[in-house]
Structure formats: structure tokens, C-alpha cells
Amino acid sequence: MLIDNKISRFLTGPYIYFGIIFLLSGVLGILSQRWVFGGINLFIAAFLYCTYSGVEIDTKKRVFREYNKWFGLFKTGKWKSLDNYLGVTLVPISKVYTMYSRSNRRTSSAKKEFRIYLVNKAKKPSVAIKKCKTLDQAQNSLDEFSIWLKMPVFSIKK
């Protein structure tokens, strides 16, 4: 079975506004018949919105690869063996995005997510293989990965 999970986008949080700026300036450039300017900005916007990273796992061959998918079309990454890892674990992550304005005022936003990791020989989370929004979804996915990969579940030490 081949498992393919998207882990993260190229732009996240408030930085997505950079992509919006390139998209709008590209559309305005095309509408005002500035083809080169508009085309370059649309190209950059397509790169920012469509590029992401992920993990692909082949359970029959017991290999995986961390990849980047450029423009949503081309995958790059090397295959590695699952035998170098002891098991899987669940790690809760709090992401805080902070931006400063020109007048040095701070704006922050926080988001909680759960990631399933492969555990390396040092018994530490090493490679993220799935990202989940809720704890229930993460627990179910952790059980599924444990069964699919035939690996034990590790608890993280605090």
C-alpha cells in the first residue's frame, strides 16, 4: 500500500498574504497589458501556493521518502528504509505566528496541531509522517500507522 501525506505548505500563517500580493499584482499586470510583469508575479504566486512538502510511504517495500512537490507537479526526495526506525509516536505542537508592523506593534496568532512521527534509534521523534487537526483524528491515525507499518507506539517523554 502506498500512503501519501501532505505535511506543510511553503507559506503558512500570516505569510500567506505575500502570496496574495503576488497574485493580485500578477492579475493587475495582465489586465493592464504588462505581460512580463504579470506573468512573473503569477509564476511566483503559483510557486508559493502550489509548492508543499510531504511524506510518501510504501508499506510493501518498507520504505518512505520525505519530498517537496514543486508547483504541485514534481516530487523530489530520496527513499529511505523504515527498518532504521523503532516505532511511531504522537507529538502535540503549538504554532505561534508573530508579525511586527512598521510601527513595531506585534500581532500574534496561535494554532494547535498534532503530528505523527517515526521514532529513531535514540527514541526521539525524527520524521513527521502525518499532520492532524484534532486529538481524536491523531489517535486514530497513530493506531492505523502502527498496524500498517507493524511498529509499536512510543510515548514521548516530557
Image: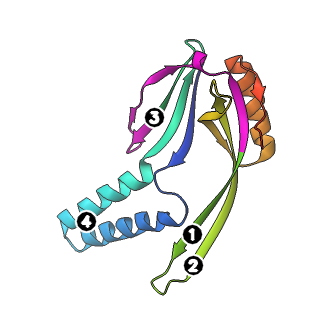
Left or right placement of residue 108 versus residue 77 in this view: right
Q: Amino acid at mark 1?
A: Thr
Tag shown at residue 38: 4
Mark nearer the N terminus (4 vs 2): 4
Q: Is residue 91 above or below residue 97?
A: above
Q: CA distance from mark 1 to mark 3?
A: 27 Å
Structural distance between the alpha carbons of marks 3 and 4:
30 Å
Structural distance between the alpha carbons of marks 2 and 3: 34 Å
Q: Left or right: 81 with respect to 88?
A: left
Residue at 59 percent across and 12 percent down: it is 60
Give the labeled residue for mark 2. Answer: 106
Q: Is residue 125 above or below residue 36?
A: above
Quadrant of the rendering where the C terminus is positioned: top right
Q: Earlier in the sequence, mark 1 or mark 3?
A: 3
Residue shown at the point (52%, 58%) measured from the top left:
12
Mark 2 or mark 1: whose residue is earlier in sequence: 1
Task: Name the kind of residue labelled 2 in the image.
Answer: Arg
Q: Disc 1 or 4, which lies upstream in sequence?
A: 4
- Give the Cα separation between the discs numbered 2 and 1: 7 Å
> In front: mark 1 or mark 3?
1
Among the 4 quarters of the image, the one containing residue 118: top right
Disc 4 vs disc 2: which is toward the camera? 2
Find residue 67 and name its label: 3
Secondary structure at badge 1 equals: strand
Disc 3 residue type (three-letter): Tyr
